[in-house]
Each structure stands twice: as C-alpha cells, then as structure tokens.
Image (cartoon, rainbow, N blue to C red):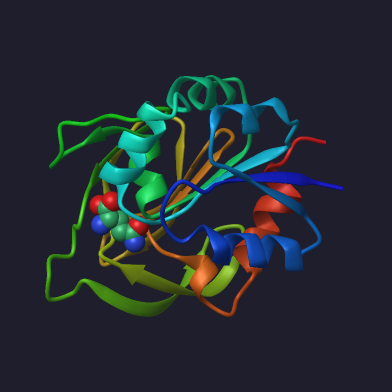
C-alpha cells in the first residue's frame, strides 16, 4: 500500500487526503518534525498561502529535511501555493522556499478580477480535466528538464520536473481524480 504524506500546516490539505484515500493510498499528515520519522512513498504540498506555509515550514524545522527528501527523489505533487514552495524563483516575492524546481513563478498572477475561475483543459499524460484556479500563480519561465503539461492563455499552469509535479490549480477541489491517479501510478517509487 502506498503511503502518502500530506503537508498539513496550513491550507487545503483535507481535500487532497480525501482524494488520495479514495484512490486507495494510506495518508498521514506532516505537522511537525517528528512526523518525518515515518516512512512514506510520496509527498503532497497543498494550496493555501505560500508565505504562511513557508514561515511555518521554517519555524517547525521542516523546510530543510523535506527539501533533502525532494532533492533525493521523493515524488511530490504540489498545487497552487505548493508550486510556489517548489519554485527556484518567485518573480514578485523575494522568498525562496524549497527551490527544487527550476521555474520562475508569479504569485497571484491573474490579478484580483480573475482571482478564481474554472476551465477544462488537456493536461499532458492525464487527459482533459477541469482546472480550478483560486488566486493562482502561473509559471513565467521554465528551465532545462522541465516538461510543460498544460497552458492556459499561453501561461504555463502545470509542469513536471523529475520527481516533481507542480500545478497552479486545484485538482483536489474538482470531481476529477485523474491527476491524483496519474501521480500515484506514475510518479511514485515502487
Ligand atoms: N495566492 C496564494 C499564494 O500566493 C496561493 C493561492 C492558493 O494556493 N490557492 O500563496
């Protein structure tokens, strides 16, 4: 049975847990450093507020140990604020958190008017799925080795780099489990 750790210090982690459990994974929450003593096969970084999550990751002494795991190949699914945590550069914020994915992201990239919307779009390797955006970032530039999985209006909204899948939107807030299924089937280590 696949064991998936979900970062649960802030944000929309419950919805990921429900979806993963529904797909047959065993899920547990990471809230403090001792939670990392458990073994797990994959990690989920949820949406929320990247500044708050980043601050908590530092204060709880989770940032470095999780960065090491990601760097050494732990499969990661990151959504929205989670994408911001993975990015090497944030164009409108001086912070860098994990910095394990060679992309430049822009926070709140759609402005206030278009803060939240939903579209249907083809995601590479996955198929057509509903994409739900909430005060979302997008990827402005992608470095070498980054595979672009989806674009909306010329902006990159889904990308994969080695063991990391990062999405600007929230699959866990839609009816479709296809992205989580893809993650569990194709990115996790045996
Ligand atoms: N606007 C948030 C941020 O910048 C991300 C929004 C989300 O995760 N839904 O961190």
Q: What x and y, as percent, mark residue 114?
A: 18, 74
Kindly identify the residue that appears in the image at 54 percent across and 41 percent down.
31
Q: Quadrant of ligand 1?
A: bottom left
Measured along the vertical axis of the image, is residue 120 above or below residue 28?
A: below
Query: Quadrant of the rendered structure where residue 43 is?
Result: top right
From the viewer's perspective, tell me whether residue 119 is left or right of residue 34: left
Query: Quadrant of the rendered structure where residue 110 is?
Result: bottom left
Q: Is residue 16 visible?
A: yes
From the viewer's perspective, tell me whether residue 40 is left or right of residue 167: right
Kindly identify the residue that appears in the image at 15 percent across and 38 percent down.
93
From the viewer's perspective, tell me whether residue 176 is left or right of residue 116: right
Q: What x and y, as percent, mark residue 9?
A: 46, 46
Of residues 56 and 84, the one nearer the viewer is 56
Of residues 160 and 114, the one nearer the viewer is 114
Kindly identify the residue that appears in the image at 12 percent across and 65 percent down.
111
Of residues 18 and 33, the one nearer the viewer is 33
Measured along the vertical axis of the image, is residue 102 above or below residue 171?
A: above
Q: What x and y, as percent, mark residue 83?
A: 39, 46
């Amino acid at each position: 049975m696949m064991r998936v750790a979900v970062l649960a210090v802030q944000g929309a982690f419950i919805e990921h847990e429900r979806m993963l459990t529904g797909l047959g994974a065993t899920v547990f929450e990471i809230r403090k450093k001792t939670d990392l003593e458990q073994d797990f096969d994959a990690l989920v970084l949820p949406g929320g507020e990247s500044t708050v999550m980043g601050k908590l990751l530092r204060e709880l002494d989770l940032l470095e140990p999780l960065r090491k795991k990601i760097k050494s190949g732990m499969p990661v699914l990151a959504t929205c604020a989670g994408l911001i945590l993975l990015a090497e550069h944030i164009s409108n914020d001086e912070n860098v958190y994990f910095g394990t994915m060679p992309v430049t992201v822009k926070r709140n990239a759609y402005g206030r008017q278009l803060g939240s919307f939903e579209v249907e779009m083809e995601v590479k390797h996955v198929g057509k799925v509903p994409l739900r955006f909430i005060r979302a970032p997008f990827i402005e530039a992608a470095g070498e080795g980054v595979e672009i999985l989806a674009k909306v209006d010329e902006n990159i909204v889904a990308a994969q780099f080695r063991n990391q899948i990062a999405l600007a939107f929230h699959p866990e807030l839609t009816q479709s489990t296809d992205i989580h299924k893809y993650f569990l089937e194709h990115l996790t280590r045996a």
